[in-house]
Amino acid sequence: MMKAKHLLALAGVVGMFSASYAIDAPKPKKATAKEPVDFVNPNIGNISHMLVPTYPTTHLPNSMMRVFPVRHDYTTNRIGGLPLIVTHHRSESSFNFYPYQGSESGIKPTITLSYDQEKITPYRYKEYLDEANIATDFAPSHQSAVYSITFEKPGAPYLVFNCRRGELKASGSVISGHQDIGNNTSLYIYAVTDVAPSKVGTATRNSGVSWNGPVSASLVVSYPTGTKKIGMRYGISLISVEQAKKNLDREIRNFDVNAVAEAGRKVWNEALGKIAVSGANDNTTTVFYTSLYRTYERPIVISEDGRYFSASDGKVHSDEGHPFSTDDWTWDTYRAAHPLRVLINKQGENDILNSYILMSEQTGKGWFPTFPGVSGDDHAMNSNHGIAMVADAYAKGLRGFDLARAYAACKASVETKSLLPWSYTPSGELDNFFKKNGYIPALKPGEKETVANVTGEKRQPVAVTLGTSYDEWCLSQIAQDLGKTDDANHYLKASYNYRNVFNPKTGFFHPKDKDGNFIEPLDYRMDGGPGARQYYDENNGYVYRWDVQHNIGDLVKLVGGNEKFVDALEDMFNTGYPVSRWDFYAMLPDHTGNVGMFSMANEPAFHIPYLYNYAGAPWRTQKRIRSLLDEWYRNDLMGIPGDEDGGGMTAFVVFSEMGFYPVTPGSPTYNIGSPSFPYIKMNLGNGKYFEIKAQNASFTNKYIQSAKLNGKPLNQPWFKHSDIANGGVLELVMGPVANKNWGINSPPPSAAPMPM
């Protein structure tokens, strides 16, 4: 970014040039100040390093209506039609359509189209179909959207609609229908065009169009020759076609894409404007606001006029004044996305927790959901970290949900539901072993799996043991809040079960067989089969070495004290691949974004850079977090190191660029890192603000020289939620050389001692 004096000098040069050679040239217009949404670049990360890229999603915050281009990947120059509604995070569009001009024999249920001039913002999506000479323009509302399609060629225009598992029908200017989206859940659509069709038919794969009926899974609607522009507005619903029409009529009553886009722009600026940042360059600001935009993609609110369809029991319910939310992968999002919402959207987080409590009750099983989706809980990954969401929200003062009901569901998820990864079955053999011995046993080399319900995701014994230890610590916090002292003591003691798989000889968490013996030999970098799932999960032993979010202080002691702990962290960041990179990623494709054996691409690693704070070396956290942000989060097509998971990863960026992070959801504390901006102002609601003033902050000036919190000197690398809950100011003086004495003697708090 140019310094002010350089800009003035450049202005002088330009002025002299203009005076000599372009006296009559019009004066340039004054640049319009950017608003938060103008910094959002939906294309960041659209090319993945290994697995799933980000998607350039157009939607309003946490809304049902979401779309992104119907294409294989960013680099293709062809799309498979135009999207109408994406119901599940990063899934294909449930309905789509394509505009067409030409001979009827060229019409098929689906075709690919060449495109150009694509422009995507959070509130608008434009495409030019260059071979077809058709321009499209789209803008969404919450449960509805509007398209404008402009045809440049002569001849009759067509719109060809498609759904894979359902039917569509046309009646006059109305197109409606439904599609099965799984688990006895249907999506309904009601669309209206501003031009009356001339005829309606069915697209066939081999013989063009059959003009013999208005009902089809691939509906062709022909419009009068000479029609140059067609407007289409449509609503969607999980309840009925009639409700889809109500949603449309409530939100969009004409075909004005500009008006809907402007309304959406305003909504986005209000949402993103809850955090104001300034003082950094445009690339840093773009990464920040794009990351914040991604945290609003999920969960989605599916209440429709006070009612919602629940896939948990297949019924339509009243939401009783609490908007119902779903589509959330809690293993990914509990770490940062939910804690961020606790700060900037308390009512939204209360509503989400109410929704998940209802889901657990509606299933009849009483288990808290793990991956709640539009068509039901997907039961994915390991452990049940929705428990952490409940503990974190309550610890930070949220009271808009029933803690006792939440606790009943959370407790049942540990006691009566199996801990097996990717399972939705009652407790069984391995669960009984865990309750007796305090760890999940690994299979010995060559030992065959005999336990029923173990899926292709394997046992993940270390990951499950560590994750459940943390979940049980969260249960102990909730039980304590409810006055259930016996439960609190029981789960606090159980939260130390991670010790049962700690290998004191190596300082790593190590798989142990049913006889209590460590599996040997073991390479912590590579062993465990595909995704290391025989022992860990998606990440190797180096990442899971630090997976004790609730008791880092005890982990420091286990590893051997501050100096050895810091050395172990440094060793992880500096240990190279044991094999070629392609062989490493063939075995561990989720383990991207590598710095040594650290994986910036996967959620269990997010808290690791902050752990130096617990071992007397906060300056190393400041150095490491800024280098990781600079290396892996950039304003470009590969600017995300791994699966973003709808806010799971980018919430880490939002926190880290602000300079603090919730290492332990469930604990009302935050670790301090190194802010990317000299000034940050977060709207906490109810007229309360938290400000961070980081004097001299820049990429060079990344080190904290001194600090104040609410006007008082702060010499610790953490602060309490209560310090900022009613507003506050964190003042930091930043510099280019580390102050290695700041904050070294006051580590963040960890779990209470184990009860005797």
Image (cartoon, rainbow, N blue to C red):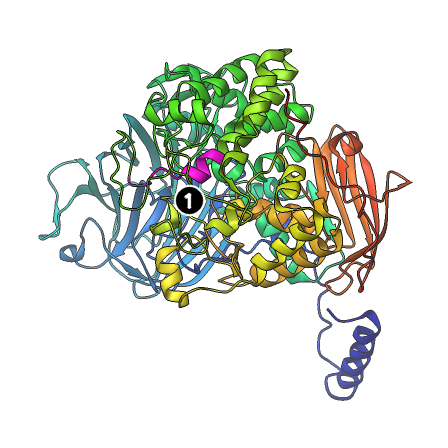
Figure quadrant of the C terminus? top right
Q: Nearer the viewer, residue 15 or 445?
A: 445
Residue at 75 percent of width and 49 percent of height: 616
Q: Nearer the viewer, residue 72 or 488?
A: 488
264, above or below 575, in the image: above
Q: Nearer the viewer, residue 647 or 505?
A: 505
Q: Is residue 347 left or right of residue 691?
A: left
18, above or below 728, in the image: below
What span is colored magenta in the figure?
Answer: 456-465
Residue at 76 percent of width and 44 percent of height: 681
Answer yes or no: is residue 205 visible: yes
- Residue 221 image point, x, y percent: 23, 44
Q: Is residue 732 left or right of residue 367?
A: right
| Residue corresponding to mark 1 | 537
Q: Amino acid at mark 1?
A: Asp
- Residue 71 image point, x, y percent: 34, 55
Q: Check if residue 462 falls in the magenta segment.
A: yes
Residue farthest right in this picture: 712
Q: Quadrant of residue 362?
A: top left
Residue at 25 percent of width and 49 percent of height: 224
Figure quadrant of the N terminus? bottom right
Q: Quadrant of residue 373?
A: top left
- Residue 570 image point, x, y percent: 62, 58
Answer yes or no: is residue 401 visible: no
Residue at 56 percent of width and 60 percent of height: 632
- Residue 105 image point, x, y percent: 13, 56
Q: Check if residue 439 falls in the magenta segment.
A: no
